[in-house]
Image (cartoon, grey):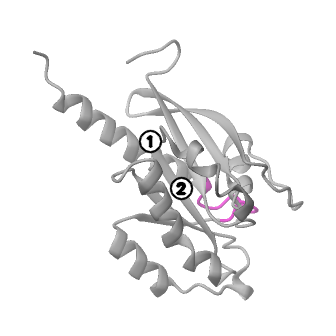
């Protein structure tokens, strides 16, 4: 499956409400930077990052989708072909957590029913204004069978681990899939 300087190409979509920190997570992971200024994503933006995983070179296309309702009609186009998804909510905004179920349904409808998904509670650094409890999250991840990370793009906590885990889950799925295809 080698193509030039990488073995695998994985499209990963970041979804979630507006202002939960999808762009900040993406920027922190891809470039190691953070800005306090909020800049609304227009439709979609994407970055490319290459990782070495289990002896393979994996190229990630990370698609940062706009969370605003006005982009709801075009968002499904960006989900197509995704191999993994990162669903982001803001630990300081309970409503963004309650909306996670909507994002899960969209991903499963437009990408794949069995797509590897990681749930991310972002803005961990804002402990004084936290509105989402650990038990709330545990109930959801148990029901959905998702991995969960708490992150802070601002202080660079849990960001790399999140993207590495979703990449690892995709790679495992790809390896199993390629092994189940037997030559005729």
Per the rendering, the mark at residue 154 is none
Q: Residue at x 65, y 58 (%)?
A: 72
29 in relation to 139, above or below: above
Front-most of 1 and 70? 70
Q: Which residue appears farthest toward the front when viewing the image?
A: 73
Expressed as whole percent of the image width and height from the top left, the position of residue 7 reads 43, 22
45 in relation to 157, above or below: above
Q: Seen in the image, is 140 located left or right of residue 151?
A: left
Q: Residue at x 53, y 55 (%)?
A: 86
Q: Which residue is mark 2?
A: 86
Label 1 neighbour load within 10 Å: few <14, some 14-19, many 20+ = many
Q: Which residue appears farthest toward the left when viewing the image?
A: 184
Quadrant the N terminus occupies: top left
Q: Seen in the image, is 97 located left or right of residue 84?
A: right
Front-most of 63 and 73? 73
Secondary structure at badge 1 equals loop
Q: Seen in the image, is 38 located left or right of residue 16?
A: right
Expressed as whole percent of the image width and height from the top left, the position of residue 27 reads 73, 47
Secondary structure at badge 2 equals strand
Expressed as whole percent of the image width and height from the top left, the position of residue 75 reads 62, 51
Q: Which residue is mark 1?
A: 83
Quadrant the C terminus occupies: top left
Q: Which span of residues is magenta-colored?
A: 152-159
Q: Seen in the image, is 101 located left or right of residue 73?
A: left
């Amino acid at each position: 499956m080698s193509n030039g300087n990488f073995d695998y190409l994985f499209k990963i979509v970041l979804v979630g409400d507006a202002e939960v920190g999808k762009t900040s997570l993406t920027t922190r992971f891809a470039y190691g930077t953070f800005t306090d200024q909020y800049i609304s994503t227009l439709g979609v933006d994407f970055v490319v990052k290459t990782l070495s995983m289990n002896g393979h070179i994996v190229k990630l296309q990370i698609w940062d989708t706009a969370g605003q309702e006005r982009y709801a009609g075009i968002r499904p186009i960006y989900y197509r072909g995704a191999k993994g998804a990162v669903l982001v909510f803001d630990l300081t905004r309970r409503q963004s957590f309650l909306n996670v179920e909507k994002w899960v349904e969209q991903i499963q409808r437009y990408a794949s029913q069995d797509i590897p998904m990681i749930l991310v509670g972002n803005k961990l650094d804002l402990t004084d204004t936290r509105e989402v409890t650990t038990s709330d999250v545990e109930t959801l991840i148990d029901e959905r069978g998702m991995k969960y990370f708490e992150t802070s793009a601002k202080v660079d906590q849990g960001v790399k681990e999140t993207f590495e885990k979703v990449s690892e889950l995709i790679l495992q799925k790809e390896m199993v899939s390629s092994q189940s295809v037997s030559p005729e």
